[in-house]
Amino acid sequence: MSTVPTSVAITPNTINDGLPLVHTGRKPPVLPWPDIGHFAKWSVSSFKFGFGPDCLQDDDPDTFWHSDGPQPHFVTLEFPRKMAIQKISLFLCFPQDDSYTPAALSVRAGTSPGDLQEVRAVTLDKPDGWITFDVSAEPGDDGEGFKPVHAYILQVIILTNHMNGKDTHVRGMRILGPLEDQASWDDPFPFVTPKFKMHEYIR
């Protein structure tokens, strides 16, 4: 994987223009990038009973994944095929969660658990709301934005919490794909027009 890890500091005042988006509302924001998280199998490093990985996807701001083990804590997504992954959106709430709030993240991607590589490192300063950032730090071909990361496995690792807290709370997580329609990344001749789509499965 050619992506160079890059650290980015996120504060509640960070706005657009290639920087992370911060939405202070509690409900998931309406974003143009497609949510592809439902394609993946989700697992976490540990959790307290009733506060498992399902709480990351239920769109309920009052529920949260609560880790219950040694650091680092992590969320792993395993896709059935190689996916183009553009952004991650997290709902974190420092005013409610205090020392349970993540302070430093590492995002890793790869084709198997044995070849995961860091593609992004993120630090957070008392986040409160939905924070959306690019997974990749490699500039796009047109010089605008960043390229998506193509991977079978994506892992979000929580390295530290605010005030050196032990366990962590994450109230929501979304995995977003690129804006353009993604045909199979491995297919050099994808069927993309309606006319060709009609003959896609003819042998």
Image (tube, rainbow, N blue to C red):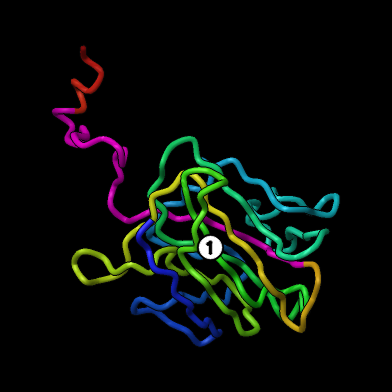
Q: What element carries label 1?
A: strand
Magenta residues (range): 168-196
Q: Badge 1 local density, few (<14 within 10 Å), some, or many (20+)?
A: many
Residue at the bottom extreme of this rendering: 13
Residue drawn at 65 percent across, 83 percent down: 126
Is residue 112 within the magenta segment? no
Is residue 171 within the magenta segment? yes
Residue at the right extreme of this rendering: 49
Residue drawn at 22 percent across, 35 percent down: 190
- Going by the image, does 146 lie left or right of 10? left
**What amino acid does circle 1 point to?**
Val
Q: Position of residue 203 (x, y in %)?
A: 21, 12
Residue drawn at 61 percent across, 84 percent down: 125
Marks counted in the figure total: 1
- Going by the image, does 70 lie left or right of 179? right
Task: Say which of 25 and 4 sits in front.
Answer: 4
Please name the residue that numbered disc 1 is placed on: 107
Q: Position of residue 51 (x, y in %)?
A: 79, 54
Quadrant in the picture for residue 174: bottom right
Q: Position of residue 64 (x, y in %)?
A: 73, 60
